[in-house]
Image (spheres, rainbow, N blue to C red):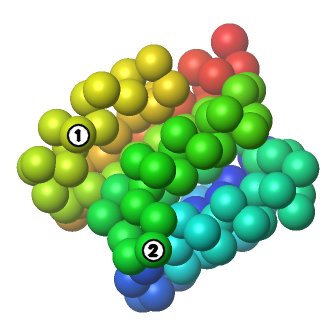
């Protein structure tokens, strides 16, 4: 299946999301913030099928991460998650580089279906 980098500063959610996606056969690496995620992307030379990141995080938020990741790895598919309406509005300006913005809370079934859809769209 796909290699996914899951980024969220809330460890329980990060672990839950990664575990849920592995149920579909995806390989997931995780990062606790945008800076750690960017380091992982660079170390792995961008070899991910999807960057799935929360928007609101300390150090480097998901929007800054998305911009830096897309600049370094233009073919990387990016999906954002947020529980904040104002963050979702900020993400609208990124429509050209972000495939999807999921609103928290979501079920694992909703997440799995959305991730599958985003990956299928990026391949097709």
Whole-percent x and y of residue 123?
71, 20
Which SS class for mark 2? loop
Q: Is the N terminus in the top left, top right, bottom left or bottom right quadrant?
A: top right
Whole-percent x and y of residue 117?
51, 30
Please give the residue where the numbered disc 1 appears in the rendered image.
90
Q: Residues within 10 Å of mark 2 (few under 14, many from 20)?
A: few
Q: Label 2 near label 1: C-beta < 8 Å?
A: no
Q: Nearer the viewer, residue 60 or 7?
A: 60
At 20% from the left and 50% from the top, the residue drawn is 87
Please give the residue where the numbered disc 2 appears in the rendered image.
59
At 60% from the left and 69% from the top, the residue drawn is 35
Q: Image check: 104 left or right of 22?
A: left
Whole-percent x and y of residue 62?
43, 55
Which SS class for mark 1? helix
Query: CA separation, marks 1 and 2?
Result: 17 Å
Q: Nearer the viewer, residue 116 or 39?
A: 39
Q: Is residue 60 above or below residue 9?
A: above
Label total for image:
2
Whole-percent x and y of residue 111?
41, 52
Q: Nearer the viewer, residue 51 or 22?
A: 51
């Amino acid at each position: 299946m796909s290699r996914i980098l899951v980024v969220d500063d809330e460890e329980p959610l990060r672990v839950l999301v990664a575990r849920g996606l592995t149920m579909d056969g995806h390989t997931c690496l995780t990062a606790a913030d945008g800076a750690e995620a960017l380091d992982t992307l660079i170390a792995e030379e961008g070899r991910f099928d999807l960057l799935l990141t929360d928007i609101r995080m300390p150090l480097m938020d998901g929007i800054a991460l998305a911009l830096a990741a897309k600049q370094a790895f233009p073919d990387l598919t990016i999906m954002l998650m947020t529980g904040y309406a104002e963050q979702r509005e900020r993400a609208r300006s990124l429509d050209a580089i972000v495939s999807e913005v999921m609103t928290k809370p979501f079920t694992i079934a909703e997440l799995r279906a959305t991730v599958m859809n985003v990956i299928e769209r990026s391949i097709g």
